[in-house]
Structure formats: C-alpha cells, structure tokens
Amino acid sequence: MKFKHLVSVFLATVISASSYLKAEDFAFVVDPVVKQRLTGIKAEFESLPKDQSKSYQTLKAAAIEANNNGKFFTALITATDAMKIFTKDIDLLLLIGICYAQLDKPVEAEVFYNKALEIQPHHAPSILNLIELNLYHGDFEKVVKRVVYIREYLKSAGHETSPLLEYKYLLALTKLSEKQADKYAADLKKMQELYSYNDDHPYYYYVKALDSLKKGDNDAGQVWIYKAAKIFGNMKLIDTWNKSLKDTNYLADHDIMISARANNN
C-alpha cells in the first residue's frame, strides 16, 4: 500500500508568513517571534542576487509540478538543487519531506518536516503530514503526542480539532492499548463516546466499524462503513476515513467496495 501525503503542494509564493487542521484552521494568530523570523527569512531571500533568486524560483516551480504529477524522485532532485541556493523556505522543506514520504523513506521525511517546524512550530501541513506518516508507519505514540499538541494550540486560540484528526487519535490509542490496556483505557473510552450518530460527520459510524474490525468481524465493519456512505453520500469523504483504517491495517484495499456499492444503489 503506497503512502499518500495529506497536503497538496500547490504553492505560488516563496515564503508564507502565516500558518495554515485542514490546514486553514491554523490560519489565525502567528507568534510574534515566529513572524519576525519569517520576515527575516523573506528579507534574506530578497537579498539574493537576481540570477540566483530567478534560478531558485524556476527550480521550485519545476519541483512542485513534478510532485503534482507524481514524479516524486524528479521532484526531490529538483527541490534539492533549489536548496543549494536557499535553505529556509518552509514550502520547499515540506515538499522534500513529502517526496521522501512518497518514496517510502520515513526517517528522511520526518527530518525535513521537522526542519519546517523549527522555523514555524505551528506549521499545519508539516504537523499533519507527520501525523499521517507516523500513523502509516506505526509510530502511534508520536501520533498521540502530536494530536495532543495540536489540540492545545487550537484550544489556546479558541478553536477545535477536526473529527477526522480525533479519529486518527482514536486509532493510535486503539493500537497502543493492545499492549498497554490499562494505561489507555480511560482515554480510549472517552474517544469512543466523543460523538454520536446525530453529528454531521461519520465519526460515530467509524468508531463502530473499528470496534468490529479489531474483533475480526470484517462483515460487521463493512456494514458500518456502508451505512456511513449511504447517510453522508460523499464518496470522497468516505474514502478519506477509509484511508485511516487502511493505514492502520484494520482494512485492506480489497475490502473497499463501499464506494462502488453506494454509487450503484
């Protein structure tokens, strides 16, 4: 199963001075220290000789295009060439991390996501891609730690996380509780009861699906997923939730017949 990065890299500007949970949910207050740092980086780029800045922008645009076309090795090589000119562009650091993730090099991917976070600690695309990477590769303690971090940051600004991110947190807890049931029991129960069937997202149905799938009852799990597909009628949404179950090996690609059946009905 091929890893898929979470955030598309369609970036026109060289440096963004704002942070982006969907990623736009992070687009509020920027720490003054971080803002000053980003302003300094922008000024540093603008002080480059014109031929260097032009070469950089050309390489960066080519790397983004290659990534968007699924040519991840080409994108990585091109982005690396751009880095030889300028090393502090968060967009490019994120892009290199995504390329390494797509090339199944999680250690290298994490290094570059963290480089972006050294510049902007609340950079949502990097945090969310790290959560996807950690979930896919079974680093469940890191998933828990990073979701808690996001929660606290958003709470401090009067915002909440998304149901899908909370579901990934539940998946990580479920995996961790297989070996340390007592440690995670209370939090696990809380997450299982976080939302009801009255909410306008499929969290409730996917909790039920997870409960069936982890017990080995694949048919019952499929039924709950099918219910969610019929109720919400958004196959792109359902595929996104299914991906989280596939990433944690509760669901296999050949099990995913939900979209086709729902569309046929």
Image: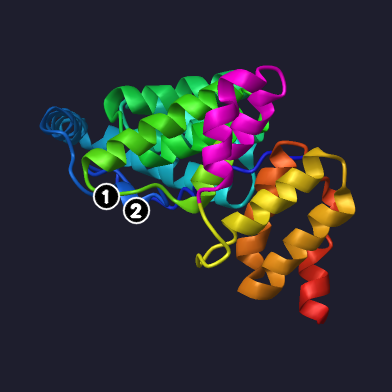
Q: Where is mark 2, residue-wise?
A: 24
Q: Which amino acid type is shown beneath numbered disc 1?
A: Ala
Instruction: State the residue at coordinates (32%, 22%).
Output: 118
Using residue 219 as the reference point, say whether residue 38 is left or right of it: left
Residue 77: quarter of image: top right
Residue 143 pos. (x, y %): 53, 29
Does residue 233 appear left or right of residue 222 in this picture? left
Q: Is residue 242 above or below residue 60?
A: below
x 71%, y 45%: residue: 245
Q: Quadrant of residue 125?
A: top left
Residue 92: give x, y in percent of width and height: 41, 35
Name the residue carrying label 1: 27
- The CA distance from mark 2 to mark 1 is 5 Å
Q: Residue at x 31, y 34 (%)?
A: 152
Q: Is residue 239 above or below residue 194?
A: below
Q: Residues within 10 Å of mark 1 (few under 14, many from 20)?
A: some
Residue 99 seen in this snapshot: no
Q: Is residue 64 above or below residue 204?
A: above
Query: Toward the viewer: 213 or 118?
Result: 213
Q: Amino acid at mark 2?
A: Glu
Q: Secondary structure at mark 1?
A: loop
Q: Is residue 34 above or below residue 232?
A: above
Q: Residue 29: image x %, image y %?
A: 18, 44
10 Å crowding of disc 2: few (<14), some (14-19), many (20+): few
The residue under the point 50% across, 45% down is 165
- Whether pointer 2 and pointer 1 mark residues with C-beta atoms closer than 8 Å, the reply is yes
- Region rendered in magenta: 170-194
Name the spot of residue 211 as percent of width and height, x first.
73, 44
